[in-house]
Image: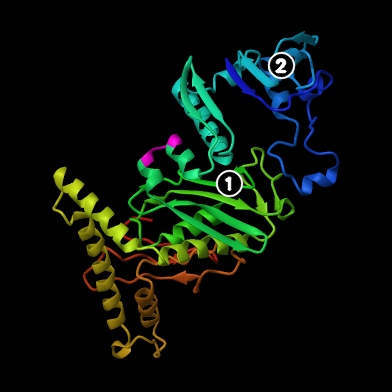
Amino acid sequence: LVRVADNGCGISAEQLVLAVASHATSKISDADDLFSVRSLGFRGEALASIAEISHFQIRSRQSDDEAGAEMEVIGGEIRPLAPCGAPVGTTIEVRNLFFNTPVRRKFLRTTQTEMGHAIEAFTRIALAFPDVHFTFAHNGRTLHDLPPISDWRERIAKLFDADLAGALIDIEGQDGDVTLRGLVADPSHSRGSNRMQYVFLNGRHIRDRALQHALGEAYRGLLMTGRFPIAFLQLNMPPEMVDVNVHPTKLEVRFQDGSRLYSVLLGSLRRKFLSTDMTARVGKADAEQAAGNSAAGGSGPNAAGSRVDAAHAADSELSDWARRQLPGGSNTATAGSQQARLALQYAANPRGIPPFKPFDDGRPSFAPSQTTAVAPPGDSTHAAPATARLPGEATVDRGGER
């Protein structure tokens, strides 16, 4: 059983049948509304799809009605409408999901996995609307009871933990009618994936690669490789500036001016970090991590920092060698030697990683289209054969690691 209830304005008895009809919606009145969607749902597919593959029941009552109305749908078959006692608002109950599609039912994961998906969906909607009271109960036990609040940090503390909420930094930015506000964690709180990056556009949870890249760029040099920042961001803009009707789940959207959003986010983060003593925060995080490594049998109190220093030292040594391959040890290749040109390229970019272009115009990141990696005499670690690559694509071969 899955039950969702609210205390909203309710649905009239005459409209209940339309509520479960395919492609019927109250969110838009004409086709032009699709270009300025202000609601979360507008396709009229959710209830109709669920009612097709479950035992579905809906009860609703408006404030000026003496009694509510109840309707059942069994596998898409609508049963007669009946009066019922109900509080103001709407309650939907779903039982026996996929009872008439056993093949689909086999694709359900374990109870714990499906429960995790339900909690994640609840978390997103609860973060998007902190001014709404949400309750999440499972098997008679209340897992979350979130009263309405005005401080987003309090909602985050309830959903995650107080230590994380206390370590968050307020950020805000604006570019005309595009506004940004949110909370980001200092480097001592990071994750091994980007799942803790919650971005909401006009109250809708979205995922956007360019915005995720802007977050990574802002934290460049503050986090170890493979770590991702934690962020809770709210973006607001006129709905006509974004198309939300491009993905089945509406998780991905299309912006009219994506680079503008990228600049607002990256600029706001960098300005905030420049005005905040992030160096002290990073030092504290490194010290705590090193202490933990030492207690767990690590290589000493500076184990974490030593690994970073060793990596930088290795790159510096390789860059120095590359510069020595140039005529006269200069930093400019004037003799036209292929080895000199490659050495200069390697000295400027020892890791061979081109800059990321979130809004690539199709031109290659850098030339030439074919390159040969060279290695110091007697060192086969960084040797690589000639490798052809497509425009805009870089291939790096360092000891078999690609």
| Residue pointed to by mark 2 | 59
Q: Estimate the x, y position of residue 190 in percent, counting from the top left.
A: 37, 48
Q: Estimate the x, y position of residue 56 in percent, counting from the top left.
A: 68, 15
| Quadrant in which residue 326 is drawn | bottom left
Is residue 285 shown left or right of residue 393? left
Above or below residue 227? Residue 81 is above
Q: Where does the N terminus fall, quadrant-wise?
A: top right
Is residue 317 shown left or right of residue 347? left
Q: Where does the C terminus fall, quadrant-wise?
A: bottom left
Q: Is residue 315 magenta?
A: no
Residue 200 is tagged as: 1
Q: CA distance from mark 1 to mark 2?
A: 30 Å
Going by the numbered disc 2, the residue's amino acid type is Arg
Describe the element under mark 2 as helix, strand or loop. Answer: strand
Q: Which residues are magenta?
A: 158-162
Q: Estimate the x, y position of residue 301 in percent, counting from the top left.
A: 15, 54
Is residue 336 shown left or right of residue 198? left
Q: Residue drawn 27% across and 72% down?
A: 316
Near-viewer residue (301 or 5) = 5
Describe the element under mark 1 as helix, strand or loop. Answer: strand
Q: Estimate the x, y position of residue 290 in percent, counting from the top left.
A: 20, 52
Q: Residue drawn 36% across and 69% down?
A: 373
Residue count near mark 1 (Cα–Cα under 10 Å), binned few <14, some 14–19, many ≥20: many
Going by the numbered disc 1, the residue's amino acid type is Phe
| Quadrant in which residue 64 is drawn | top right
Residue count near mark 2 (Cα–Cα under 10 Å), binned few <14, some 14–19, many ≥20: many
Query: Which marked residue is nearer to the observer: mark 1 or mark 2?
Result: 2
**Magenta stretch, overall SS:** helix
Above or below residue 63? Residue 346 is below
Of callouts 1 and 2, the N-terminal one: 2
